[in-house]
Amino acid sequence: MDETTTKPSPPAPPGSFSPPSPGAPGPPGRATVPEIVAAKGARRLVMVTATDEPSARWCDRAGVDLILVGDSLAMAVLGRKDTLSVTVSEMVHHTRAVVAGAARALVIADMPFGSYQASVEDAVRTACRLVAEGGAQAVKLEGPRPREVEAIAAAGVPVMAHLGLTPQSLHRLGGYRVQAREAGAALALLRQAKELERAGAFSLVLEAVPAEVGRAATAALAIPTIGIGAGPHCDGQVLVLADLLGLSDDPAPRFVRRYEALGQRMRDAVAAFAADVRSGAYPAAAECYPSPEGLADALARGGGGG
Ligand code: KIV
């Protein structure tokens, strides 16, 4: 069931591009971590996921502040059933493509499952790979892991933390469920958030928690909170691009707002191409290269090796 049908603005015509309106996005030039932190209380931050060069380029042109190469790419673009099998090498591969397309937004790479849970050393090694090989400007990891955050930050890599629904803990959580629904769990989450901030996280993703928990965390922290299903009081919002654009067949969670139906538009465009090929309407004369001078005469004289 798709609960979300709101379409705030009509789609732009294909190929059209207008630069973001002045004042709407952040300062010109590549966004930096200190600018993202300073945005708290001054303007709302916009983050989307991207997985390749074109999607990063168009999101960047739309004026987003942050692009996350999320491990959700396992499900959104690799067709896997969850995020658990994505590897560091795959994350590096996608991060390089996103970095190639993002001229302005800060690019954050997700640390995949298994790449930081066993030791702090693993965590630092993975973070450094995502920066050195992938070109990311920051990394994100899931869960209350202040020791890992501290060590990665000490290595010079900015870290975004992630609490609430942490999909890498899918099996422990018993599914993709709303978190911090009881007061005790909400207070525990707030304590973890403070600890992550003290450890040096520069921002915090809050996923699938009640709006009041999003409000309390946002008020308690000096670093920006970025919500996904965490209500309107967070300092910024993030959506997975495939959800926002309508590329997924799966039922969307409650918090997803679809701004496009790109899957259907893609199907229609490809079906139109197929119909033109089958009817002979494609290619037309204007889509063909001109004949070499003298070829028609030469063929008429019997040239061409026949
Ligand atoms: O992997 C991802 O896309 C994420 C977002 C949901 C924040 O972690």
Image (spheres, grey):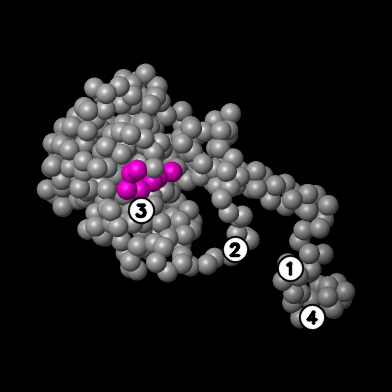
Q: What residue lies at 14% left-to-right and 49% top-to-bottom?
A: 155
Closer to the chain start, of discs 1 and 3, is 3
Position of residue 62 measured from the top left corner of the image (x, y, whole percent): 47, 59
Closer to the chain start, of discs 4 and 1, is 1
Point out the image quarter for the C terminus.
bottom right
Q: Is residue 124 left or right of residue 133?
A: left
Queried whether the magenta region covers residue 234, the answer comes back as yes
Closer to the chain start, of discs 1 and 2, is 2
- Near-viewer residue (68 or 184): 184
Q: What residue lies at 13% left-to-right and 41% top-to-bottom?
A: 199
Point out the image quarter for the N terminus.
top right
Q: Residues within 10 Å of mark 1 (few under 14, many from 20)?
A: few
Amino acid at pointer 4: Gly
- Near-viewer residue (177 or 304): 177
Residues at discs 3 and 2 in contact (Cβ within 8 Å): no
Task: Look at mark 1 in the image and give the residue it sits on.
Answer: 288
